[in-house]
């Protein structure tokens, strides 16, 4: 199987120092490798989408989703983590 299993991670909230670092550290702590990242600040609002390789994830995917959601709550951010297959099926025309 040449394709990696991937996740789509979105982060939205008020801009503050260290958002990318916090999210990146959480990914690294659970064996999730960030492959691509797009981020922007509009007015005072931070927005980021990451594509991450989850082949090496060290916990069940749903546990990682919960960790990221909690990181969002504790950082006043909305962090959504979806398996790429679910994301694609939700956005299919």
Image (tube, rainbow, N blue to C red):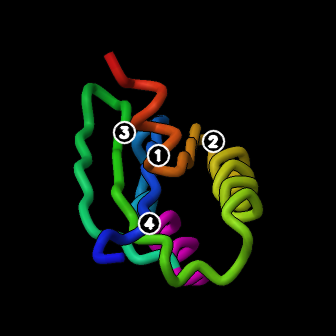
* Front position among marks 4 and 2: 4
**Quarter that holds the C terminus:** top left
**Residue range of the region highlighted in magenta in the rendering:** 21-31
- Kindly indicate whether the residue at mark 3 contacts the one at mark 1 (C-beta within 8 angstroms): no
* Front position among marks 4 and 3: 4
Q: Name the residue under label 3.
A: 46
Q: Is residue 28 visible?
A: no
In this rendering, would 58 be left or right of 6? right
Please rate how many residues cluster around mark 3, counting C-alpha atoms within 10 Å: few if below 14, some from 14 to 19, many from 20.
some
Q: Can residue 41 be seen in this view?
A: yes
Please rate how many residues cluster around mark 4, counting C-alpha atoms within 10 Å: few if below 14, some from 14 to 19, many from 20.
some
- Quadrant in which residue 37 is drawn: bottom left
The span from disc 2 to disc 1 (Cα, nearest Å) is: 27 Å
The structure residue drawn at horizontal position 40% and vertical position 42%, both measured from the top left corner, is 15
SS type, badge 3: strand
Q: Where is residue 59 in the image (x, y as percent from the top left)?
A: 72, 76
* Front position among marks 2 and 1: 1
Image disc number at residue 85: 1
């Amino acid at each position: 199987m040449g394709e990696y299993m991937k996740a789509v991670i979105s982060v939205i909230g008020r801009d503050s120092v260290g958002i990318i670092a916090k999210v990146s550290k959480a990914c690294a702590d659970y064996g999730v490798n960030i492959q691509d990242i797009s981020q922007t600040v509009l007015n005072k609002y931070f927005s980021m989408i990451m594509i991450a390789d989850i082949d090496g994830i060290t916990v069940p995917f749903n546990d990682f989703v919960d960790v990221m959601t909690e990181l969002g709550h504790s950082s006043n951010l909305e962090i959504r983590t979806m398996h790429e297959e679910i994301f694609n099926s939700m956005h299919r025309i």
